[in-house]
Amino acid sequence: MNNPKVFVLKHSYSDGSGHSLMRAYLDQDRANADWKLLKDLPSLSSDVDLVAVELYGVIEQPKVNTSALKLIDTAPRDGRFILLAGPSGYTGTPLRYEAGRWSTDYRAWVNHSNDRFTDGGADATYWMPLPEV
């Protein structure tokens, strides 16, 4: 079985800055189309390369054990602090966690500074009680 390939397009700018840009594609036709477009742009140097790189595995998002977490719809809305969890937007850390409480003033989940949980990204989807100290 053949390993999948990723197509890497590298181009350098001709402005003398030494900057270059790399783009990765899983679709060879799209990579070829962009290569043809970029190699004719006057703002780029003639250094526009397209190479195929064989992948030796696919990076998957880690599985999150949510067995200790409860759905946010079941969280208490009485002002006590709980541990909130919601999507982080990153593949390496799928959930982000923050201590927070329901604010009746904001009608939202907030942290100790009254910043909304959504200020860090998506809204909370899970919760659990804070550990006893």
Image (cartoon, helix red, strand yellow):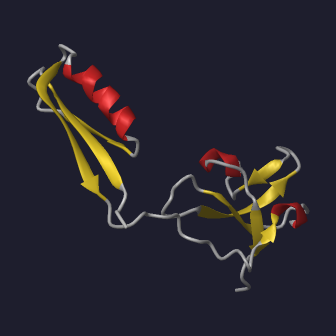
Q: Identify whether 40 is placed above or below 61.
A: above
The reply to whether residue 76 is visible in this rendering is: no
Q: Residue furthest top?
A: 42
The quarter of the image holding the N terminus is bottom left
Q: Relative to 12, say whether 117 is above or below.
A: below
Q: Residue furthest left?
A: 16
Please provide percent x and percent y for residue 4.
Answer: 37, 57
Residue at 25% from the left image edge and 48% from the top image edge? 52
Q: Is residue 14 left or right of residue 81?
A: left
The residue shown at (57%, 62%) is 94
**Towards the viewer: 68 or 118:** 68
Q: Give me the residue at 17% from left, 13% from top.
A: 42
Residue 81, image x, y percentages: 78, 67
Which quadrant is home to the C terminus? bottom right
Asked if residue 87 lies left or right of residue 38, the reply is right
Q: Nearer the viewer, residue 18 or 7?
A: 7
Residue 92 lies left or right of residue 97; in this view the side is left
Q: In the displayed structure, would residue 32 be above or below residue 65?
A: above
Residue 24 in sight here = yes
Which residue ends up furthest to the front in the rendered image? 1
Q: Position of residue 92 (x, y in %)?
A: 48, 63
The number of callouts visible is 0
Which residue shows up at 19% across the image and 16% down it?
43
Q: Work out whether 23 lies above or below 99.
A: above
Residue 6 placement (x, y as % from top left): 33, 50
Q: Locate residue 58: give its quadrant.
A: bottom left
